[in-house]
């Protein structure tokens, strides 16, 4: 009996076609989950060498699609050389930032500095949220996409009353502080304590923001902090394009002074997409100077309700310039063995690769046309943890990656993100 138990505990690595069975001994280390030579599909890298030819850096703050409340769908996005970030969904914020700011070389690579009093990890994480996240694009109002923003909202603001936006020391002249001074916003007020509260923008379609205002920031589920000057809502119309500088609470005379800097030099275009009974959103971000594009999808997929999810995504692809596309964020909540009728508005690897076919076919093409997606990074979001029976004893992340690669006919660079580890593209 003792030997039988040992056999059951110790998995043997066996090849079954292109599939593997996990060899981990009680799963005590990362290598027990993932074969070491394949770890690089996680981080994507963010060192100077990895980022040499890249324009953008994204930071996964949360990467799973439920259960793990410490790592729910959320990303930050910045342009190389900037210390300002925008949020793309906000399921987990503080925990992801805390992990990020503890990376050994993060603060050096991104030129992030802290006030002298910010020495504890929680102090640095909170300072980063206050001073380096400029605003949030929210794709839909489910808690696993907004919960982090709700919970950390009490500390998500630089306070003039604490002199946090006064530059008394050069080492903290970065992030939102630098932005406010470049705008000339601070110098317009005689007394530092008289500067109005800085409302961070929460940007989304009407359905999303209505739900956040009435169901979450409503004084019952959570205090109505937007009403008290913490945030401003900016409503986007379906298929409409906006300059990011118009999606802030600052007057044009201020934003015009930073219009060539990230994120104010970007356009945002929103598209309504299907997520079962809910309307979700895809955002196309376009650099107004270089024309480079990023497409971020909040949850979407095969619906049990009447919603033509493929047609909705087709409308997104028709606005993408394929030669300018840098990255696509798409969810794969489940593996290929999950049936259509229990997807509830989500995707699998086989659905994603069909969408890559559609992207190449329906996007705005070059002449001669591009025949592959080797220049594009496909960042996979919202993978649900493996909690049921699985004959290969592999995590969902590993299974999703493998299933995507098996049918990756266009050479798109598949990235399964790891919380807190930046990715360049």
Image (cartoon, helix red, strand yellow):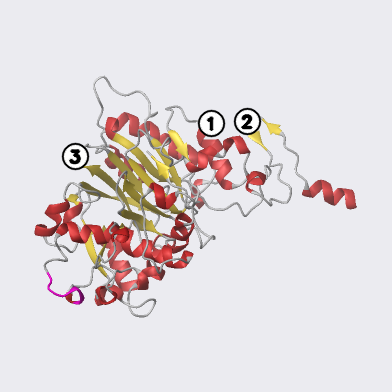
Residue 308 in sight from this viewpoint = no
Q: Is residue 398 left or right of residue 242?
A: right
Q: Which residues are magenta?
A: 189-193
The foreground one among 174 and 205 is 174
Seen in the picture, residue 116 relative to 420 is either above or below; the reply is below
Quadrant housing residue 335:
top right
Is residue 41 covered in magenta? no
Q: CA distance from mark 1 to mark 3?
A: 37 Å
Q: Earlier in the sequence, mark 2 or mark 3?
A: 2
Q: Earlier in the sequence, mark 1 or mark 2?
A: 2
Marks 1 & 2, CB-CB < 8 Å contact: yes
Residue at 75% from the left image edge and 39% from the top image edge: 12
Q: CA distance from mark 2 to mark 3?
A: 44 Å
Q: Residue furthest left?
A: 253
Q: Earlier in the sequence, mark 1 or mark 3?
A: 3
Seen in the picture, residue 170 relative to 374 is either above or below; the reply is below
Residue at 18% from the left image edge and 56% from the top image edge: 182
Q: Residues within 10 Å of mark 1 (few under 14, many from 20)?
A: few
Residue at 65% from the left image edge and 29% from the top image edge: 17
Q: Quadrant of the C terminus?
A: top left
Give residue 18's mark: 2
Residue on which the image places disc 1: 406
- Secondary structure found at label 2: loop
Q: Position of residue 249 (x, y in %)?
A: 18, 64
Q: Position of residue 176 (x, y in %)?
A: 27, 60
């Amino acid at each position: 009996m003792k030997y039988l138990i040992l056999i059951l505990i110790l998995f043997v690595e066996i090849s079954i076609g292109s599939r593997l069975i996990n060899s981990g001994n009680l799963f005590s280390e990362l290598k027990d989950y993932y074969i070491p030579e394949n770890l690089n599909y996680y981080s994507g890298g963010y060192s100077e060498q990895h980022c040499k030819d890249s324009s953008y850096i994204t930071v996964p703050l949360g990467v799973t699609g439920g259960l793990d409340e410490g790592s729910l769908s959320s990303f930050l996005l910045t342009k190389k050389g900037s210390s300002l970030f925008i949020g793309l969904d906000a399921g987990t914020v503080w925990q992801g930032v805390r992990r990020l700011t503890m990376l050994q070389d993060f603060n050096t690579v991104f030129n992030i500095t802290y006030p002298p009093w910010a020495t504890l990890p929680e102090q640095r994480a909170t300072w980063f949220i206050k001073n380096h996240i400029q605003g949030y694009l929210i794709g839909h109002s489910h808690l696993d996409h907004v919960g982090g923003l709700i919970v950390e909202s009490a500390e998500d603001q630089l306070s003039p009353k604490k002199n946090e936006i006064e530059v008394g020391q050069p080492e903290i002249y970065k992030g939102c502080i630098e932005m406010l001074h470049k705008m000339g916003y601070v110098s317009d007020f005689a007394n530092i304590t008289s500067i109005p509260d800085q409302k961070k923008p929460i940007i989304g379609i009407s359905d999303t923001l209505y739900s956040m205002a009435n169901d979450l920031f409503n004084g019952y589920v959570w205090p109505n902090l937007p009403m008290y000057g913490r945030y401003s809502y900016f409503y986007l119309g379906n298929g409409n394009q906006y300059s990011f500088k118009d999606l802030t609470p600052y007057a044009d005379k201020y934003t015009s002074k930073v219009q060539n800097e990230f994120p104010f030099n970007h356009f945002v275009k929103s598209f309504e997409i299907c997520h079962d009974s809910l309307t979700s959103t895809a955002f196309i971000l376009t650099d107004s100077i270089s024309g480079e594009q990023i497409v971020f999808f909040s949850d979407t997929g095969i619906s049990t309700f009447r919603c033509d999810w493929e047609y909705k995504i087709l409308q997104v692809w028709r606005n993408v310039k394929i030669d300018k596309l840098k990255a696509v964020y798409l969810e794969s909540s489940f593996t290929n063995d999950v049936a259509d009728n229990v997807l509830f508005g989500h995707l699998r690897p086989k659905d994603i690769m069909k969408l890559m076919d559609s992207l190449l076919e329906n996007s705005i093409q070059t002449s001669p046309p591009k025949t592959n997606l080797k220049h594009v990074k496909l960042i996979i979001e919202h993978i649900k943890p493996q909690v049921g029976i699985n004959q290969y004893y592999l995590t969902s992340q590993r299974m999703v990656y493998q299933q995507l690669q098996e049918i990756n006919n266009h050479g798109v660079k598949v990235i399964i993100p790891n919380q807190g580890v930046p990715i360049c593209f």
